[in-house]
Image (spheres, rainbow, N blue to C red):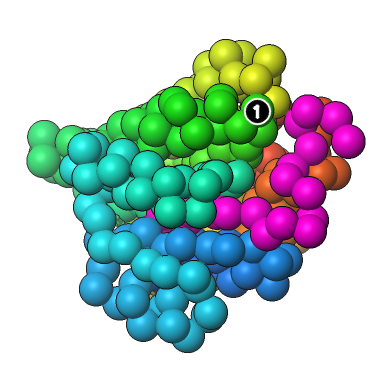
Amino acid sequence: MNALSAAPKAQPRVALVTGSAQGIGEAIAQRLIADGDLVVLLDIAPAVKDTAARIGATDSVRVDVRDIPALQQAVHDVANRFGRLDILVNCAGTCGRESFEDLSPATWQRDIDTNLTAMAFACQAAVFPHMKAQGSGRLINIASVSGKVGGIGPVDPSGGGGRSGAAYASAKAGAINLTRWIARQVGGWGITANAVAPGPIASPMAAGGEYGVSRSPIPRMGEPAEVAAAVAYLAGPDSSYTTGTCLHVDGGYVLA
Ligand SMILES: NC(=O)c1ccc[n+]([C@@H]2O[C@H](COP(=O)([O-])OP(=O)(O)OC[C@H]3O[C@@H](n4cnc5c(N)ncnc54)[C@H](O)[C@@H]3O)[C@@H](O)[C@H]2O)c1
């Protein structure tokens, strides 16, 4: 087994998944639990407790990921409790859809803080000291194809809202490059860092949106479990030589 392999199967891996009270994060947690991992859910929503009970998570914690000290403490608490942290999935996200004209500083700050800043500081707390000290770890950051193509969703020709907003698209583009930056630093320590960029996925965030998926090579919305499958690959031993990448799970949406 080389240094980049995940922890031995005999010992359950320990995973923390942010934004996991519902939607894609819940599906990721469910998949990791099915794969035999000890999974702690983290979310701002009180429902995270019920979700954890429903899907058989090891524990849950209520944290606003924009509160960086609380977020980093939650990462340290999980690692210290189990003696290791093998997998961190940054999935918490918010998506303003205002037009550029209507974009407010408050929406800009919320989406940058939730989608990008929290990701950076959760990764920092996971690596220093835990993953670096154990010589292994998987950082998996949920970006979006919005960060590749400048926002997706309904385009109002008059300039109105609907498309995933400028703050969200900027944050997700940042998430992809943040992941590359971290990957360059941590590879020598046995840690990989990868992003996943979903396209239109049938989750609460995308509910009611018209994404024109009939024009996609795979002409349907994606399922949260299909994003979770990509995360499972990046969390597992088969991706031992993959780092700094951004895996699209979008049915070819960005090709359409
Ligand atoms: N659904 C899509 O089409 C789609 C496409 C591309 C990327 N994504 C990304 O996938 C991730 C999950 O999205 P989803 O579709 O499941 O959305 P969702 O709205 O269903 O779930 C997001 C979760 O993040 C939590 N969250 C939001 N702000 C938080 C905060 N400040 N602190 C802690 N938790 C917070 C919410 O409570 C919720 O449980 C997000 O990062 C999103 O940007 C979604």
The x, y position of residue 149, in whole percent, is 52, 34
- Picture residue at 11% right of the left edge, 34% below the top: 105
- Picture residue at 52% right of the left edge, 40% below the top: 141
Judge whether residue 220 can be spotted in this image: no
67 over 177 or under it: above or below: below
Q: Quadrant of ligand 1?
A: bottom left
Q: Main secondary structure of the magenta part?
A: loop
243 over 235 or under it: above or below: above
Q: In this image, 233 relative to 40: left or right?
A: right
State the residue position of label 1.
Answer: 135
- Picture residue at 65% right of the left edge, 28% below the top: 135
**Could you tell me which quadrant the N terminus lies in?**
top right
Amino acid beneath label 1? Gly
Quarter location, residue 225 = bottom right
Q: Is residue 84 magenta?
A: no
Q: In this image, 27 relative to 124: left or right?
A: right
- Picture residue at 63% right of the left edge, 69% below the top: 33
How crowded is the residue under tag 1: few (<14 C-alpha within 10 Å), some, or many (20+)?
some
202 over 124 or under it: above or below: below
> Number of numbered discs present?
1
Give the residues drawn in magenta, as a range. Answer: 1-20
The x, y position of residue 36, in whole percent, is 70, 67
135 over 83 or under it: above or below: above
Q: In this image, 109 relative to 162: left or right?
A: left
Quarter location, residue 118 = top left
The x, y position of residue 158, in whole percent, is 28, 46
The x, y position of residue 191, in whole percent, is 65, 29
**Residue lying at the far right of the rendered structure:** 1
Secondary structure of the residue carrying tag 1 is: loop
Q: Nearer the viewer, residue 136 or 21?
A: 136
Q: Nearer the viewer, residue 186 or 81?
A: 81
Judge whether residue 107 can be spotted in this image: yes
